[in-house]
Amino acid sequence: MNSARTPALPKLSAYTTLRLGGPARRFVSAVTSEDLVAAVREADATGEPVLLLGGGSNLVVGDAGFDGTLVEVANTGWRRDGNVVEVEAGQNWDVFVAGLVDAGLGGLECLSGIPGSVGATPIQNVGAYGCEVAESIVSLELYDRVTREVRTLKADDLGFAYRTSILKGTDTGVVLSVRFEIREDGLSAPIRYAELARTLGVEIGERVPAADARDAVLGLRRGKGMVLDPDDHDTWSAGSFFTNPIVPAADAEAVLKRITDTVEGTFPQYPADGGVKLSAAWLIERAGFAKGYPGPGSRVSLSTKHTLALTNRGDATTEDLLALAREVRDGVHERFGVRLHPEPLLINCVI
């Protein structure tokens, strides 16, 4: 029996952490993997545009909404087989991570507090505090909209890199479930992030009880307005709006010289993919955009806690947010010659 539901059409603002976005033309909630495949197949058969909705934490939807079918990925739950856990794509990510920690299992605790659904995590190789899901993903089940078949892709097939995979930037694959390798000894993954190590009072590379790492990560995220709270407008965001830029090796010398000629002292830089990765937050702040920097009519602003988050202060439009994003992006480029790129998926809008 098909258990997909077709509720009244809401605005997407009710389904995104930014609380922004106009209506969809049609809305379907798929509560099983079979429903999800059926909903996408039905839309594809009629040529209907499809937008998949998980937790809505990585979406910026235009004020005009989406002229097609919005499919809510609402299949939930997980199953454990030894040190591998298979999780349904619509499962809330942090509820899953909390469940692992409560069960004395480790490996994903440094990714605590990240909003959104499990199925979205491999698409952009979600990461934080020195960890990425690519390190734990074993495989995933995916509906291929080209072949119209359900396929299993192993981690090596997914082309993981910094905040990306072969699934990003394409809508041909619909993630149905993800398998993660977890640690059965109850300890965390090695602590690699300096701020987290300092908070825990350990050296880089040490492991701690997973529950301790989770508590520390949640504390750090709350201090930056990165844990969802309906009463805190600093959390009305899509998380980090810009990725940390990676400057190609051929351009690195000129860019680094421009930065050192412009700003005194040292600055964060890391080797990455043959080039140099810079801190987007550092560049934004040094380009003159402080925490709380306002956008049009102060309806949007940079978070008062973290310059990487662009926030809705309560009565904003998507265009307000995009105007602030353009100002920040262009200001960083003018000051340092570095182009910032948005991390969220932009639907029916551009910056």
Image: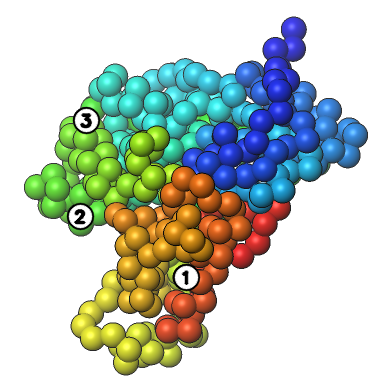
Between residues 310 and 32, which one lies in front from this camera angle?
A: 310
Circle 1 residue: 328
Using a 10 Å C-alpha cutoff, classify the residue at mark 1 as few (fewer than 14 neighbours), some (14 to 19) or many (20 or more). many
Contact? badges 1 and 3 (CB < 8 Å): no
> Which residue corresponds to mark 3?
211
Q: Nearer the viewer, mark 1 or mark 2?
A: 1
Q: Secondary structure at mark 3?
A: helix
Can you give x and y, in whole percent of width and height, for residue 245 in the image?
A: 45, 69
Mark 3 Cα shell of 10 Å, populated few (<14), some (14-19), many (≥20): many
Cβ atoms under marks 2 and 3 closer than 8 Å: no
Residue at the image point whose x is 20% and y is 49% from the top: 196
- Identify the mark at residue 69; answer none if there is no mark: none
Circle 2: residue type = Glu
What amino acid type should be assigned to the residue bearing mark 1?
Answer: Val
101 over 215 or under it: above or below: above
Q: Secondary structure at mark 2?
A: helix
Mark 2 or 3, nearer chain start: 2
